[in-house]
Amino acid sequence: MRISNRVKSLISSPIRKLTPYADATRASGKKIYALNIGQPDIETPHEFMDAIRNFEQKVIAYGPSKGNPNLIAAISKYYKDWNMDYEAKDIYITNGGSEALLFSLSATCDPGDELIVFEPYYPNYSMFATELGIKVVPISLNADNGYRLPPEEEIEKAVTSRTRAILVTNPSNPTGAVYTKEEMERLARISLKHDLALLSDEVYREFVYDGAYVSFGTMPALKENLILIDSVSKRYSACGARVGCVICKNPVFQANMLKCCQSRLCSPTLEQVGAAALYTTPKSVLEAVKAEYIKRRDTIEAELAKLPGVKASTPQGAFYVMVTFPVDDSEKFAIWLLEHFDIDGETVMFAPGNGFYQDPEKGKKGARLAYVLNCDNIKKAIHILGEGLKAYPGRDK
Amino acid sequence: MRISNRVKSLISSPIRKLTPYADATRASGKKIYALNIGQPDIETPHEFMDAIRNFEQKVIAYGPSKGNPNLIAAISKYYKDWNMDYEAKDIYITNGGSEALLFSLSATCDPGDELIVFEPYYPNYSMFATELGIKVVPISLNADNGYRLPPEEEIEKAVTSRTRAILVTNPSNPTGAVYTKEEMERLARISLKHDLALLSDEVYREFVYDGAYVSFGTMPALKENLILIDSVSKRYSACGARVGCVICKNPVFQANMLKCCQSRLCSPTLEQVGAAALYTTPKSVLEAVKAEYIKRRDTIEAELAKLPGVKASTPQGAFYVMVTFPVDDSEKFAIWLLEHFDIDGETVMFAPGNGFYQDPEKGKKGARLAYVLNCDNIKKAIHILGEGLKAYPGRDK
């Protein structure tokens, strides 16, 4: 039987493609410091399992397609605390931020339509677009200026008659940039001028370390054009729960989003019960987590600064840092670290930069490091990385 | 902003489209006997919640993209008990049978490719195809002969150069037909002759009441072409868990299915833990459930036979019966029952037949009834239906 071109042309995620190498490394008895994936080591708040353990219904039944009403109410309240007014009818629960993105792209772009993204970007953006036949139009950001957004006229040059949406992550995965209100207003103006959907992936909203954070949800002019993507994964260290949502005030979009939700019947029952309880986590817990990430950010920045030839920008938010290594090919280097290098039985893993760009060459020397380990482990991991760089045969001469 | 044609052209599921009417009816204080949706009232085996309550990991972390290894091992063992040899590498866990179908269609059909289905069909088949730009080519089955498959040459007439897959449900939703080995061999031969994918949705495997059941998985010749769709939803009355799987031995398909799984990172952690435990449910429990469904099938058949002008076939499996009502339009009748009819504050809801056909006219007088309520409630529901038919202004003269 034939395999479709759409799936054949999917490029494996740089975040997960090295898993087979890592499995073999672990099977050989080595320990790996995993900086490749945004999987925090922070404990999930106990409210999650408490609520699930107390679930008493005898039949694990289909729920409403648009989500558990208690969870939707909890999210609405959370947004009110952020001074954003989203009612139950505006919120659609999805299987993680992933499905929120897939449905939003599906509902706004037809095959052949164009989606503007800022590069480097979260690689799964491109996977969703490929699955849906959407053309990704990347606008390159520059490490040297901290991955700031380009001037308005430069962004607008990317808009064509086929452009349907702009997708932006704020705070950014993978760069850690947090956009200023002025930068965001550029995107808002372009979206409104050309009546584009503005898809704002704000799953790292709580993780801002420097400067002010503004959500697109606070800009009333965007009411009809803004689609917010959110998730409990990072906020509450509950990545495995796969609970996200799409938020939008446009009634036509809403009617169509409901059809997308109905097509897969509903999201899982128990994970939604747990997620609703997560929104009752005291704010002090989130604040402590943020303080911990600031320490980690400062630690990884200081440790990377000790490595000759390694360039790294300072992330202002999220929990990633993009680096450039003095090597021939960061993917080869990553595999070599897993297969051929260790210090006392320990090695390190990161996400090669090539998958964060449409043209893999642009990210050939780059990498994304996730500072999701505690400071001691970050120090050990970056030390191993530095020693590995010294020993790696493909190091730049 | 624009809404995509692909999502605009999605037709709301006949199973869920009446939900707003039902919500209003319930809000008015009426009770509804819900025969519209395949949501059993059977208790989910306690093994599900027991396993979840005992989950002790402190971080609800991303799992492997292809699924929890314990769940995969449990499914592999379950298939061995059915004399089918599927190893861990052949099994990909999905968010319900829904995602299993979406991924399998995505991986086998490009936009414009053709998918053969037998009509009446499960309406979400058509939703997934629409989302993916796949052309559904229906082959009509006939109520008068119990919805048997047509002769081989007639099926083969539907194959064109764009045909990529045949999708079949066995036992069938919505007809309740269980195909004979000879009928299945027709599909196997056509699939192999034209090198088509044969997608077999076998989620109702345990619910066969008359005659012998054969899985396509027992046909060795299909090894490279067969894609099995499975789920815990109906088997264990765990529809809200949203745990399904894709099973296939074709290594090229497997590599591409892994990319589909990676694109949404993973399935939910806890629901997979519970699902793995479901596979330890004693067989006697499943047998008792099946005995209960036989009683229900016999009950609904006997009750429907009492209603003048109502035609119903005898389902051999699953838990649905397709009926024809002596009315102008079964959707109008369904809405009328919700809005304008009750007996002592109770009414009944079913899925109008129009959404089970590509041409809605074909199902205009039809309906799917799910016998997922206990026998007493089935009797009450069919009594209300009968009285409603007498009173309905759009009844055939």
Image (cartoon, coloured by chain):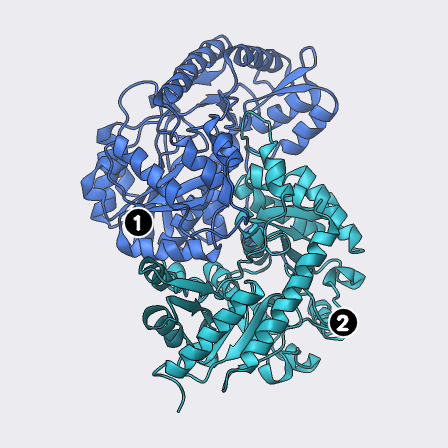
Chain colours: A cyan, B blue
In the picture provided, is B341 more to the left or to the right than B41? right
Q: CA distance from mark 2 to mark 1?
A: 49 Å
- Name the element at disc 1: helix
- Residue B378 location (% of width, % of height): 53, 14
Identify the subunit bearing mark 1. B
Q: Is residue B361 visible?
A: no
Identify the subunit bearing mark 2. A
Q: Residue furthest left?
A: B221
Residue at mark 1: B89
Residue at 73%, 63% in the rendered image:
A216
Image quarter of the N terminus of chain B:
bottom right
Residue at 57%, 58% in the rendered image:
A105
Q: Which mark is residue A181?
A: 2
Residue at 40%, 80% in the rendered image:
A329
- Residue B219 location (% of width, % of height): 21, 37
The residue type indicated by label 2 comes to Lys
- Residue B266 location (% of width, % of height): 47, 51
Q: Residues within 10 Å of mark 1 (few under 14, many from 20)?
A: some
